Image (cartoon, rainbow, N blue to C red):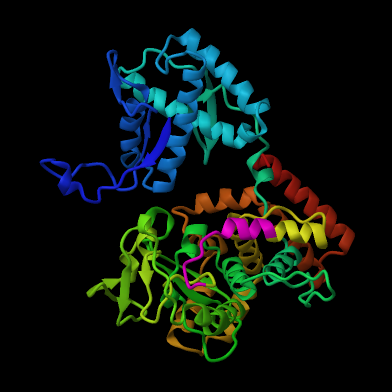
Amino acid sequence: MELAFYSGKGWESWGLAGKPTIPEGMAFLVDDDLLFEDGRGLRAAAVANEWLRLRPTENCPAPSSWGTYARILRDWIVAAQLHGVEVFDTRDRLKALLSTYAVDRATGDPKRRLGAVTWNQHMSVLGMFYRWAMAEQYATAVPFTYSQAVMLYAETVREVLVNQARRRVPKEHVTIKYLEDDFAATFVNGLAGLRPDGSEEEGPGRFRGRHLARNGAVGELVMSSGTRLQEFSYLLVCEIPPLPPAPRLMPIAFPLPEAITKGSKFRVTWTSYGALARVHSYLSLERMLACEGSAWRPPRRWGAPLFVSEMDSRGGRVNGRRVQWHTLRPAERRRLVAPDGGSMLLAVRSDGGPFTAWSTVFERTAQRIRERFEPRFPHVHPHCCRHTFAMATMERLVAGFYEQAARLSAAGSDADAALSHYLTTTEPLLVLRDLLGHSSVLTTEKYLRRLDMMRIFREHYVESGKRWGLLDHEQAQRETDDEFDAAEQKVGV
């Protein structure tokens, strides 16, 4: 069984009365004999395709998720064919297939094994598929057993069905990790090819990486802004904020266009002067050398090149037509060709083409740090940097760092004055909610709780008491333990 992705290019020559209503880039499955039905009617692959086409209307607008769902269905259908079981068979046969499938994906071929979290994702997708198939009368039974459970959140109690095929995983607040200040600095230095203390490696065995200025600049930008992988991967070079004329303590506003944000919601986060200066240094040297006169063009499978001219911070002419940058989706952004050559994306390769493989760069950097300097250094994925930003920002908000910086900068520009007023009058949780782009402060509170929010308040409670002479160290520690142990018991941490 093959997995393919739909393209409507050239549909006029297909002899159809109108353009197909299949979303561009939609994933679909095809049996090896290229048939979608036989004497018994629609095959399982055709039914799966019908369900996949509905994903954009079921809170799944991201094309990358369509491919993930299709791969999960493909693996399940192939397993059913291997064991001679129909995808819409009797309950007993489906349950037997699920049992065999679970063992295979847990202890079988190492290349096919799934961790608990990935396995649970597979069960969730298959569960949605079978519920839909039952409602549409394609299926008469499901392979899963469900039990009733009670969920409590924000003082609201509701009953939910729990799929018993799911595996147990560690508590969420344990599995989500972030980097403390020293590890965060080590990681950014590692991206730039430096030692943990920021010095250059010496000797014949020193690390000689490529694009170190690019990696270090983007890594520090992500750490200081909390942007998601898609957001910083598809930023255009003209969307980077200008560098203020002088260093400053105040954060710098960093608008993110809705075309690349989660939920397609425009938001403004911020970044630091140091991180922004590092990005501008990369733009003015390494990136300029890679792009100037570059003959790079997007590969044919991406679509036709989009040539840019007469550009500014808001938009430019794309193939002769005026376009606003904030309307361009990631698939369109990676096809943009700059007026002087090369990609329009912030990060580029040595040939001027766009670079987006940040997950690989981050993991390899973390691995190199473990092997050469610090065996305890954790695995780092792009979202870990977002968690790190959240914790560091919350800590500074609680400690009053940004409030002090705002008071010192109150006499600056109108933008500084507005941000100063915002920082001195708004609760820390509300500030962080806006920066992270959460829809509710309850989401931010739960998010921070999973990242060990109590540690921040515990440490500053102790430090404040010591600073003002209200508590000696031992007494402060006792009071802190009593206060926060009680709080943690109430929230179930």
Q: Is residue 95 above or below residue 353?
A: above
* Quarter of the figure with the N terminus: top left
Give residue 262's position: percent from left, percent from top: 43, 55
242 relative position to 226: left or right: left
Q: Quadrant of residue 302?
A: bottom left
Q: Can residue 458 be seen in the rendering of this structure?
A: no
Q: Is residue 447 above or below residue 304?
A: above
Q: Nearer the viewer, residue 278 or 103?
A: 103
* Quarter of the figure with the C terminus: top right
Give residue 303's position: percent from left, percent from top: 32, 58
24 relative position to 429: left or right: left
Q: What residue do we see at 73% from left, 49% from top?
A: 484
Q: Is residue 366 above or below residue 23?
A: below
Q: Quadrant of residue 297?
A: bottom left
Give residue 156's position: percent from left, percent from top: 49, 36
Q: Nearer the viewer, residue 131 or 99?
A: 99
Q: Nearer the viewer, residue 173 or 370?
A: 370
Q: What residue do we see at 37% from left, 79% from top?
A: 313
Q: Which residues are magenta?
A: 351-364
